[in-house]
Structure formats: structure tokens, C-alpha cells
Amino acid sequence: MGALKKNCPPEFQLTDQVATIVEKNVRDVFLSMFNLEAETGKPRFEQDHVNQGDVSGTVGMVQEEMEGTLTVSFPKRTIYNILAQIYNREFTSVDQSVKEGVGELTNVIYSMIKRGLNETGYDFKMAIPDIIVGDNHQIFKIQTGPTLVLPFVLSGEAFEVSITIRGGVRPKNRH
Amino acid sequence: MGLDPQSRVLIVDDFELMRTMLKRALGAFGFTNFTEAADSNVADQLMVEATVTRRPFSLVFLDWNLPGSTGYDLLCKWRGNPRLAELAIIMVTSESDREKVQAALKAGANDYICKPISIDKLKEKLEAVGLGKVRSA
């Protein structure tokens, strides 16, 4: 991936390139794991984004001199439909399987995005996701910063992936 | 190695979703005989029981990140046991760090698979550990 490294941005910024990496890897996760095609809405950049959903997974994006958060927020209907295809049963409440399912999905989505970003010269590390449960909950960041928001539709149901950053660093391979 | 789709398969992963998905995917290749463990202690206990009762596992999918000791620790322990020499172990992880891959292979893992696990990737790994031609998904 040497060619990509030469084109790395000087700092981690929420660019169209990052949006493309996030979009591609989220789509790949759902295709590989569930054989489902996720449709992507238009990415947008917001300054004070508040995540909303019924079940969300959030994970710190850890890299030297940078703090960031990846959040995957599902309405209940969306995650119920996804998991019903795997477990062959109907979901009517946010039980342990739903919480764990969102946790593992967040974990896999972050690992794929991390891999994609690190191929462009960054050095993100794995971290452990947290799960937030509550009907139409909102997630406010203590230190707000720019947020990349990517809306997706899966089998007619919406969900959202977002990255909020609070700093910037140079890619490890950039001179 | 001569693995057969009727062989006993142990799936070690702390997430029910991944265990269920792996079972479904392996089912597409004809596997039906699954045992699951959500942590390394249970997995190790199951391995001891399988050895004692002479109903050995033939194939293990071993997640790297587990509560308690890691999948890598378990890999090292099992590879130190000559009675498990025939056991095929595929390490599973959400990370693709080269160092981890090399460490797992050096410690005796037969192969290594990164999440998310697709049918195509799984088929490739099953063939790599000795299944040869598996039934198509």
C-alpha cells in the first residue's frame, strides 16, 4: 500500500477519503457476515452531532495524540431484523443476544475500518466497545468535535455509523 | 490430516453472535457436530473431557480475545500437549496484525482467520487444514 501512504493527509481529518473507507468496510461487514447489501446515504460532516438510536455500540479510536469515537446506532427494528436472520427467531426486546450482537458488530466494524485506515499510514489500536441501550437515546460527547455521519439502509431499515474526533495526528509513515 | 465434516468441532468465542454465525457457515459445508465455549476455562475443560472420554475434537476455531486467559494462551497450552497433536486449530480474531498472525502460527496454529468470516474465506481455511474438497455451500 505504498502508494496510498504517499497520499496520506498530514493529520487525521474527517475527509471524503475517510468517508469512503468507512462506507466500504461497513458494507463489507454486512455482506460477509449476513450476506446483506447495505445501501449508503450521503455522508455528512457535522460539528455538534448527537447520536440517536435504541441500541448503540461505541468504541474509542485510539491512536497517539488523538481521541476519537466510532459509534454505530441502531433503531430496534433494524437490529432485530438483522439478528433474526442469524438466530432464526423473532426479537421483541433488547435482550442479552441483542446487546452482545451490537457489541460484536461494533467490534468487527471498527476492526475493519481500523485496518482500512492503517493501510493509509495511521496506527489505530483495538479497543473494547461499550453498549448503550434505551429507546431513542441520545449520546452527547463531552468534548465535541467534528463528526462524520454515514447513514445506511439495510433491508429497508436505517442505521447510522459516525466518527467523532477531538484531535489530529500525523500518520506514522509520513515523513 | 483427513478431517471429515462429521468431526467434532469446538467453537471458542465469547460472543454468541459469532459462534452462531460460524456454526451456520460450517453447516453449509456439512458440519453438524458442534460444541461451544464462551471462555477459555470452559474451552480447556471441554478439551480435557474430550480427551479423557476418547471423543476428541478434530477442529477448533479459537478466538484470540477471550475473557480470562486469551485464545493464544490456550493455543500454547494445547500445543504443549502431545495428545492433541492431531487437533487442527484455526485462530480467529478481529485483528490482522502481522505480529499476531506470526505468533499464532509459530505457536502451532494450523491457520488464522480474520473477522468478518465469509463463506469463501472459511472454505479456503477448511481446505488449508486438510479438509480438501468440502461440500459446496
Image (cartoon, coloured by chain):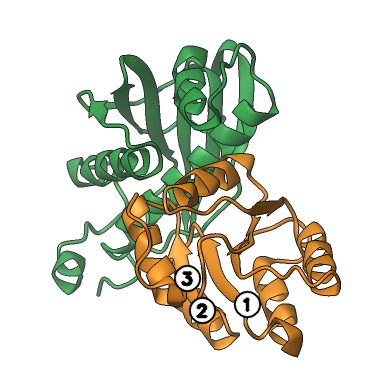
Chain colours: A green, B orange
Q: Earlier in the sequence, mark 1 or mark 2?
A: 1
x then y, percent, for residue A109: 42, 44
| Image point (31%, 40%), residue name | A31
Label 1 sits on a secondary structure element that is: loop
Q: Amino acid at mark 1?
A: Leu
Question: Residue drawn at (72%, 72%), measured in percent from left and top?
Answer: B74
- Residue A125 placed where, x, y %? 50, 60
**Res B64 → quadrant:** bottom right
Secondary structure under the numbered disc 2 in the rendered image: loop
Instruction: Describe the element under mark 3 as helix, strand or loop.
Output: strand
| Residue mark closest to the camera, 1 vs 3 | 1
The residue at the point 37 percent across, 73 percent down is B132
Above-or-below relation of A89 to A169: above
Residue indicated by mark 2: B110
Marks 1 and 3 sit apart, C-alpha to C-alpha, by 15 Å
The chain under label 3 reads: B
Q: Nearer the viewer, residue B45 or B65?
A: B45
Using the image, determine if residue A98 lies above or below residue B85: above
Q: CA distance from mark 1 to mark 2?
A: 9 Å
Q: Is residue A159 above or below residue B83?
A: above
What's the chain of the residue with tag 1?
B
Pointer 2 chain: B
Q: Residue at 36% x, 17% y: name it.
A: A158
Q: Which mark is residue B135?
A: none
* Spot occupied by residue A21 in the image (x, y as percentages of width and height): 26, 47
Which residue position is annotated with label 3? B112
- The quadrant in which the C terminus of chain A is found is bottom left
Q: Residues within 10 Å of mark 2 (few under 14, many from 20)?
A: some
